[in-house]
Amino acid sequence: MRIFHAASRSGLCLRAAALALVLSHLPALAGPFATDKAFDLTVNVGGTYNGANDTMTGGATSAPVGFATVDGTFSQTSGGNLSAINAAYNNNSAAVIRVGYRGLPLVLQTAANSSAVTLIIPSLGETVTFSAQATRDANVEDIKNYIKKTGGDILNRLQLALVKFSPVDPIAGNPGSLQARMVGDDFDRNFTQMASNIKGGGAGSDSVNNLIGVGMSVGSFTQGGLTNSVVTLPLSYTIRPDANPGRQITLYAPITVSDVGGAKSYGVNLGASYRLPLTDAWAVTPGLGYGISGSVDLGSAAAMLAASLTSQYTLRMGGFDLAIGNMVGIYQSSKLTTPDYSFDPKIRNTVLRNGVMASFPTQMMGRSLALEVSFVNTIYSGTDLYSNVYNEIGVTLGTNKSANVERSYLRAGLTYLAGQNDIRGLRMNIGYWF
């Protein structure tokens, strides 16, 4: 029965891996960035805009100018700054001002000899004209306030479009986003970091210590032509009772800083998980989490709730251990209000993350070590994201952590990631538990 159970799990994992490989090679979206920044501005004078294919035709069109921040971008939409981008522009011109907003087009359109400004967001089917003020610059200010605060659900609908079309959204849809980090943290903490622990036996005659976990993870990902650099400090505290050290409660608070095109984002993920061994070879771990992420530069802030269940099954093979991990989780955005923005885009995804890991005992400089090779695939369903599928191949070397009563261990590794829409990247990590 136990062999059949393991084989069933292995078959499920392999089928999921095959599906992920197929999906990750679907045709990729073209990179949406006109420059090496997350925001850009193009000014056309005397031409027209076609929202169906995001093109400007006729007239005189400037070269796109890139900006690292949302405030820096919109500060250039006043008349004098637009003239600096396109010398043909003046406050009486008929003009199309295209803003690349994290890869999503927003358009400001003006008629000749008019102060009115029309906002067009093709992805939302949104067209609104602002004409209450006497000047174009004042009407543009009204548009900024509309997007930030006074537009009803416009900001939430815009955010929902961004997780689908933007490769660098800080909330979801790419490996540097809040949601993806929470998914990866849940699986890594409850499977890859602890999988070979399951075979280590129960209580020993000696007392065991609780574990403080510290480390660093550094990732670099190519997303839509831009590079997203992500640094995480994975802090945790694990409680291991003497009576049964296999039953472990882990509290965690990884802190993350990311940079894409000069725009900084910050995030923290708070949560707890409880590992419950069902047999010597099998354990399940339910977990709950709450994450927040904010970026003044990208004009974004969000909160996310998480609930996950991870299964770990370990087989003793000839000379190595084979661990099988399966996780299902629900990750849902929650309302978060800041002085400038209010967000609840109602992102909700069910995530399946499946992996296999082979652990080989080895010796180096007289020390017992474990070399681990893993393959993990992740599939998102629910809210449509820029990348719904990821595959990861990892290699880790560390001290042998095969016993539940181990008082400390160290591991370091390298992971290669490939995702749908040509997302690629590397992540290096090191962790120490003591």
Image (cartoon, rainbow, N blue to C red):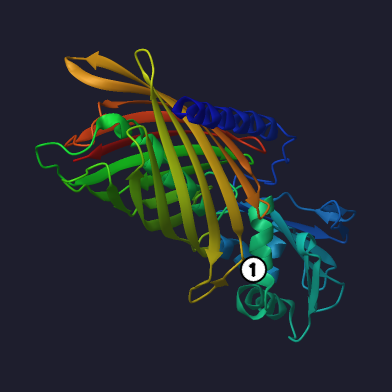
Along the line of sight, which residue is nearer the eye, 337 or 305?
305
Whether residue 101 is visible, yes or no, is no
Whether residue 306 is visible, yes or no, is yes
Q: Position of residue 164 (x, y in %)?
A: 68, 52
Q: Position of residue 132 (x, y in %)?
A: 76, 86
Image-based side of 101 in relation to 372, left or right: right
Q: Position of residue 209 (x, y in %)?
A: 15, 44
User: Mark 1, residues whose alpha carbon is within 10 Å: few (<14), some, or many (≥20)?
Assistant: some
Q: Position of residue 11 (x, y in %)?
A: 57, 28
Number of numbered labels in the structure image? 1
Along the line of sight, which residue is nearer the eye, 76 or 234?
234
Residue name at image x 52 percent, y 34 percent: 425
Image-based side of 286 in relation to 17, left or right: left
Residue name at image x 67 percent, y 64 percent: 158
Examine the rendered structure and indicate whether residue 425 appears above or below residue 386.
above
Examine the rendered structure and indicate whether residue 139 appears above or below residue 354.
below
Image-based side of 71 in relation to 243, left or right: right
Element at badge 1? helix
Residue name at image x 51 percent, y 64 percent: 302
Quadrant placement of the C terminus: top left
Query: Looking at the picture, which amino acid does disc 1 mark?
Result: Asn
Q: Which residue is mark 1?
A: 156
